Amino acid sequence: MIEWTRQLRSSFGAPFLWLICLIYFTQGFRSFVWTAVSYQLKDRLKLSPSASQFVFSIAFFPWSIKPLYGIISDCIPIQGRKRIPYLAIATVLALFPWPILGLSVTMRSSTWNLILLLTLQNLGSAMADVVIDAMIAEAVRSERAAFAGDLQSMSWLSMAIGGICGSLLGGYALSNLEIHTIFLLFSVLPTIQLFSCGLVEEGSVVNELLSESLESENSDFINGNGNVTNDDFSLKKKSNSSTRRKHSQKKGKKKANYTRTSQTANKDSSLVRQWYWSLKTAAYSLCCTFKQPIILRPMAWFFLALVTVPNLSTVMFYYQTEFLKLDPAFLGTARVVSWVGLMIGTFIYNRYLKKLKLRIALG
């Protein structure tokens, strides 16, 4: 295990591995705070099981449109970067609802305000999940493709550890702390995640394009060196006429200002046009990919599996707490079983199934 971790650190760097582990640990640790949300809806807002399920359905809707975040981050870079800026934005969205809910009695006592803040929080969490998955996919390309399964195993292992810690501590916290205190405590992890985004360096797409253009300009300059010398000689001749230059200074300033304004407008319009065509191309490629039978059939199966099976988690929570009278500590301990299963499955995959073909592993 230690040697495996050292190999990953030497290949990808400690900051990148730290960011992966932290984000997935936070995803698993969400059980610490979302159990408190369930008790807030049931005990403080006095919502029925159907009303609570309605709240959760709206709040978790951002997880249903995850491909959209990936397309936007791929096609619209922020300051030449596609991942870290979006990860920082996602972390801010996942962070600020919890301090608001922890400090404001009005916000956490209103159903619609609670829905709005929880939806924004899930939007940030889902976006962060998409961005970190994209960063993992980009990191294992070409010569480091052999570590693809290792990074995925590390991410799921971190999520399992976070789920175990969140379930155990969540049950204890609900038995000993107020719900608003739990909201404030959970905001510590997104805060650490926000600062950790600055530890990972990302190459700029603009810098790559500029380097390519500079190389082409340098080659053109070398090839046309004689012409530049002739131009310099002619400019020296023209510099003897000082009177003509004084008269043309004012006109030159006006023309320069107009040129800068027009260049800025053209640059903005070309940038928007580039984003539009990039989004259009990505959407077209995605549609063409979905039409392939090898992609369409598994997607249809997963879609039907999710649609036809009802989500009974909220109903089960009300049944466990209202009829079976189970306390939060027991509920948290019971949820540890599923996270331990995820951890065991991760170890089995990383030890025995990682090098097998997918068809053989599933068969």
Image (cartoon, helix red, strand yellow):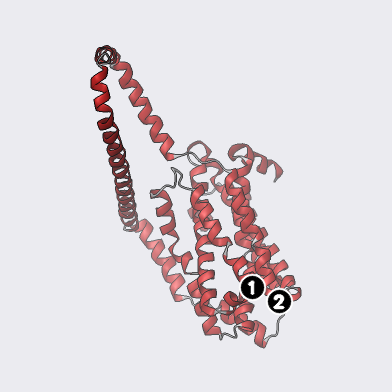
Q: Which corner quadrant of the image does residue 301 belong to? A: bottom left
Q: Earlier in the sequence, mark 1 or mark 2?
A: 1
Q: Residues within 10 Å of mark 1 (few under 14, many from 20)?
A: many
Amino acid type at image mark 1? Thr
Question: Residue 338 vs residue 330: left or right?
Answer: left
Q: Element type at marker 1? A: helix
Which residue is found at the position 64% from the left and 73% from the top? 35
Amino acid type at image mark 2? Pro
* Image mark for residue 35: 1
Q: Is residue 185 above or below residue 47?
A: above
Q: Is residue 206 above or below residue 338?
A: above
Find the distance from the CA under tag 1 to the CA under tag 2: 8 Å
Q: Is residue 165 above or below residue 47?
A: above
Q: Position of residue 61 (x, y in %)?
A: 47, 69
Question: Residue 187 vs residue 252: left or right?
Answer: right
Q: Residues within 10 Å of mark 2 (few under 14, many from 20)?
A: many
Which residue is found at the position 32% from the left and 49% from the top? 272
Residue 354 visible from this viewpoint = no
Q: Element type at marker 2? A: helix
Q: Which corner quadrant of the image does residue 229 belong to? A: top left
- Asked if the residue under mark 2 is in contact with the one under mark 1, i.e. CB atoms within 8 Å, the reply is yes
- Give the residue at mark 2: 328
Which residue is found at the position 44% from the left and 73% from the top? 307
Q: Position of residue 97 (x, y in %)?
A: 57, 66
Question: Residue 165 vs residue 195: left or right?
Answer: right
Q: Position of residue 223 (x, y in %)?
A: 29, 16
